[in-house]
């Protein structure tokens, strides 16, 4: 099993990259959300200069905010700075789009975006439609100056539903997905990816997978809802609530069972903000902080419903089971200062035993 961190892009915390590299982590996935965080590619570029082994890339870059050639130019420039240890995570952009009051890219458009990206990353000529005009495009001069497409840059596609997982198999080199309790079993996710690969006649040999998850490493005898745990991952827990707030109000479905006991008080908190500015509030503290009143909604059950929780011994056993089921990489999302302690303690008490 490989381990990495999903880092909320922060130009003032470049030292975290070398910190986790020295602790034995394999990768750093840098969040891309332009209304809240530092620019993802600037942070990645600085991180490559502070590290020697760590794999670095956007996790995930947002397709709705950059056209495919711009995305490829950015990641290929990064690959010139750190050849062979760069990857591209790509997704439809729930938070990045919703902080602008917009919706994530629809699946048909996402598939077309990935098709163009796949061809450009492979140094092919592809037909690309921009502003209603379709023309063949390719990355120019990458063999000699400015950017590198070699060593090959692996593209991980973010997929949290069957259609996106299938697109990950059709066009990607890997899949980023969510495991239970809030996601799907590993073999189910890979099954959807295989269906997509079959559509494109692609061979799944060497295909990669990774899960984005939240972890609470408990001290012996510590409650899962201790003040320390809430401080560490309370914002992660609430990120799930923010997501479903949008989905429920857009589609009219009922909130999922695990949120029903807190749904009304949470909605009351959100509705203190005027409707025209509500999209500022719902995702403003994505993985970083809590709004007033939110900590009181978080209990042990909600933490266990949204995060991987356990002592070092318990996490070792859980991870061994996930590895047996086919999971290759775990990425821990943490957006506050507690990530330094988690990185050190998890490396020392869990990774060292695996």
Image (cartoon, rainbow, N blue to C red):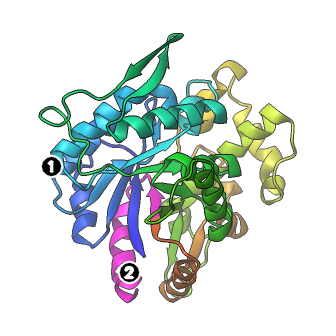
Question: How far across and how far down the image is residue 1, in percent?
Answer: 43, 76
CA separation in Å, label 1 and label 2 = 26 Å
Q: Name the residue under label 2.
A: 351
Q: Is residue 248 above or below residue 55?
A: above
Question: Who's the residue at 36% across and 69% down the image?
Answer: 343
Side (left or right) of 1 relative to 193: left
Q: In x, y percent, where is residue 156? A: 46, 51
Residue shown at 51% from the left, 48% from the top: 157
Q: Which mark is residue 97?
A: none
The picture quadrant where one finds residue 260 is bottom right
Q: Nearer the viewer, residue 96 or 275?
A: 96
- Identify the residue position indicated by label 1 in the image: 49
Crowd rating for badge 1 (residues with CA inside 10 Å; few <14, some 14–19, many 20+): few
Using the image, determine if residue 325 lies above or below residue 46: below
Residue at the image position 46 percent from the left and 24 percent from the top: 127
Q: Can residue 287 be seen in this view?
A: no
């Amino acid at each position: 099993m490989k381990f990495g961190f999903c880092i909320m892009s922060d130009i003032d915390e470049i030292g975290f990259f070398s910190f986790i590299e020295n602790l034995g982590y394999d990768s750093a996935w840098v969040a891309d959300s332009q209304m809240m965080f530092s620019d993802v590619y600037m942070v990645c570029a600085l991180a490559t200069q502070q590290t020697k082994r760590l794999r670095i890339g956007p996790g995930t870059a947002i397709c709705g905010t950059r056209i495919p050639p711009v995305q490829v130019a950015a990641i290929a420039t990064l690959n010139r700075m750190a050849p062979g240890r760069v990857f591209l995570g790509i997704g439809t952009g729930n938070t990045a789009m919703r902080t602008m009051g917009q919706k994530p890219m629809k699946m048909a458009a996402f598939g077309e975006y990935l098709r163009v990206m796949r061809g450009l990353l492979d140094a092919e000529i592809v037909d690309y439609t921009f502003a209603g005009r379709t023309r063949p495009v390719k990355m120019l001069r990458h063999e000699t100056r400015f950017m590198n497409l070699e060593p090959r840059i692996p593209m991980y596609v973010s997929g949290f539903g069957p259609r996106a997982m299938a697109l990950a198999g059709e066009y990607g080199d890997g899949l980023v997905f969510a495991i239970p309790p809030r996601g799907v079993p590993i073999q189910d996710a890979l099954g959807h990816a295989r269906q997509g690969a079959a559509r494109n006649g692609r061979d799944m040999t060497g295909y990669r997978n990774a899960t984005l998850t939240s972890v609470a490493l408990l001290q012996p005898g510590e409650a899962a809802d201790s003040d320390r745990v809430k401080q560490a991952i309370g914002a992660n827990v609430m990120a799930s609530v923010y997501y479903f707030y949008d989905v429920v109000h857009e589609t009219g479905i009922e909130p999922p069972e695990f949120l029903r006991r807190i749904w009304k008080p949470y909605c009351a908190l959100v509705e203190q903000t005027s409707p025209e500015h509500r999209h500022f509030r719902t995702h403003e503290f994505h993985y970083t902080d809590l709004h007033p009143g939110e900590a009181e909604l978080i209990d042990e059950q909600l933490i266990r419903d949204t995060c991987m929780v356990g002592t070092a011994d318990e996490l070792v056993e859980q991870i061994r089971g996930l590895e047996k089921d086919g999971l290759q990489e775990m990425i821990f999302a943490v957006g506050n200062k507690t990530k330094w302690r988690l990185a050190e303690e998890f490396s020392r008490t869990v990774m060292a035993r695996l």
